[in-house]
Amino acid sequence: MTDPSPSAIAVSSSRLWALFHLNLTRLFFPATMSADTIGVSTTNVDFWLTPWRRVDEHLPLSHIAEVTHIRGLIWDAINVESSGGLNPLRVSGVAKPAALAFVDHVRARLNEVAPVVPQQTPRR
């Protein structure tokens, strides 16, 4: 049986969201978050006048502690926390259907690679 979900998925912040928040950087260079079989990556440009100053971050699936879907009125945010607790990956202003699909995809990948915990039998 084949896997119906794609092996990679990507979301980006909405340019309309950036316009409403008066964020020129996100208007010209939307923040992106992608997930594949290896892990989750983000790409963020710091300032619109210096697009060569870009931050690319990657978090392997084995280090992901939690994927949070923060629901808003019109747009959502996605927060991916590491097991170390430092520097979570975050993207805001994502369309609702895309955010839901991304979070479901990452959680499904985490469940695939989750270690199997042996069940203990009660002692007599």
Image (cartoon, rainbow, N blue to C red):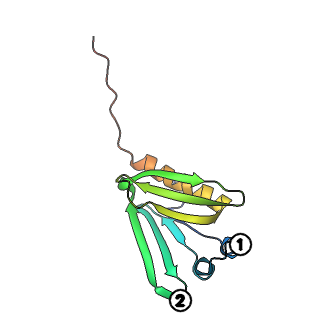
Image position, residue 33 (x, y; %): 51, 67
Q: Nearer the viewer, residue 96 or 19?
A: 19
Quote the CA–CA distance across marks 2 and 1: 20 Å
Image position, residue 67 (x, y; %): 49, 52
Image position, residue 85 (x, y; %): 38, 54
User: Horizontally, is 22 left or right of 103 in the view?
Assistant: right
Give the vertical position of 55 relative to 49 (above or below): above
**Quadrant housing the C terminus:** top left
User: Horizontally, is 84 left or right of 40 in the view?
Assistant: left
Single out the residue that lies furthest toward the top: 124
* Badge 2 or badge 1: first in the primary sequence: 1
Q: Quadrant of residue 41?
A: bottom left
Where does label 1 land, which residue?
A: 20
Q: Nearer the viewer, residue 46 or 119?
A: 46
Single out the residue that lies furthest toward the left: 124
Q: Nearer the viewer, residue 17 or 5?
A: 17
Q: Secondary structure at mark 1?
A: helix
Where does label 2 land, which residue?
A: 49
Q: Which mark is residue 117?
A: none
Q: Quadrant of residue 73?
A: bottom right
Q: Nearer the viewer, residue 40 or 93?
A: 93
Q: Residues within 10 Å of mark 2 (few under 14, many from 20)?
A: few
The reply to whether residue 84 is visible in this rendering is yes
Residue type pointed to by label 1: Phe
For image coordinates 50% across by 79% down, the residue present is 45
Give the vertical position of 55 relative to 80 (above or below): below
User: Horizontally, is 44 left or right of 99 in the view?
Assistant: left
Q: Residues within 10 Å of mark 1 (few under 14, many from 20)?
A: few
The tally of labels here is 2
